[in-house]
Image (spheres, rainbow, N blue to C red):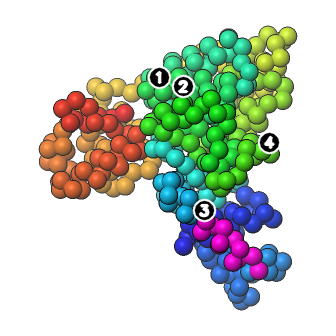
Amino acid sequence: MQLLSTMALTMVSSLNKVALQRLVAAYGSAQAVFDAAGDPDAEPQMDPALAKQLATSRATLFQRAEQELEYICREAVRTYCWGDADYPQRLAQCADAPLILFGRGKLPVNRPRQLAVVGTRHPTEYGRQLAQRTVELLAVYRPVVVSGLASGVDGVAHETALKSGLPTIGVLGHGLKSLIPAEHRMLLERMLERGGVVTKYLSDVPPLPQHFPPRNRIIAGMSDAVVVVEAKRRSGALITANLGFSYNREVFAYPGRLTDGNSEGCNNLIRRNKAALLMQPSDVADSLGWREPSGEKPAAAALTLPFDLTEQERKVYEAIVSNDAPDADTLMLLTGLSVPELSAVLLALECKSVVQCVAGQRYRQV
């Protein structure tokens, strides 16, 4: 019922993301908001105009939410409601975080290191090489690469992440029934195996221009830092960078020639002190305090413990990190879990892309 209520509340066009968050925070849940709309004595008191709007449109809103729920169940869509433990924790800290996200794939949304790489849809060959080099050289730190699944720099970032064995998440500016650009369909299918896609929009929402700036908010909000490779004077990548700056994220930009239109946006970010001048990818790791993971030092691995693990998952994950690719029998001895319990936990950890099964039915940290 909470999922239905949350979806229904997001369909109220007169409420922006900040207002939605405040309502849910004030009443405790989306369902409580609707209940309060029909109760004039509810505390805190709701604006009469809003209460009337929610009460009169409730049936229509819930009918549409039920249709969306059918799609979610049929297509195995993952949902993340603001305030829930599995909601992207970095994004949850933003005052305008969406009340709900929809996704497909394994979606490691709360890994210790998450990096946004964005840029123009029409990069130069130099820009494509920069995007590729950035992801390749930072792959040793095992970040989740976040971008917008658009043509150009976004596509290069996702593609390079997959080739480097990294999870990667694409944030869409439309519902899950669409895919823009169409040429990324094969890329999307491969992303679902190690990351996936998320969106704030209901499944049938089309890719309209006004839907992409809110998409950029999610890219910035989900990440520890934003790297801008190439960006024109006016571009979606600049929106992402400025939003990252407003969210107190680290923002980096590669400089370019003064006569190069593709670098004008990056140069302006640097000139206005909204982005650090990026000379080499290692500058990002140095600024964020990233250290190269070492299989020789279990303690170092423990520092990169994922955010979204249950108590049992945490116990098994620590056992895997602290031992040399243990098998299931060893893990049962180390954790005290039964065969069914351990099997369920291992499957959950694999779905979260934090461990993987290797030769000999052994398990190791991703």
Say which residue label 1 marks.
163
Residue range of the region highlighted in magenta in the rendering: 56-68
Which is more toward the observer, 141 or 33? 33
Between the C-alphas of marks 1 and 4, the distance is 31 Å
Residue 159 is situated, as x and y percent measured from the top left of the image, at 54, 25
Kindly tell me whether residue 281 is visible in this rendering: no
For image coordinates 52% across by 40% down, the residue present is 196
Amino acid type, mark 4: Pro
Residue 179 vertical placement versus 6 (above, below): above
In the rendered structure, does residue 60 fall within the stretch colored magenta? yes
Is the C-beta separation of discs 4 and 3 under 8 Å?
no
Left or right position of 152 against 191? right
Find residue 68 and name its label.
3
Amino acid type, mark 2: Glu
Residue 3 is situated, as x and y percent measured from the top left of the image, at 56, 66
Mark 4 or 3, which is nearer the eye? 3
N-terminal-most mark, 3 or 1: 3
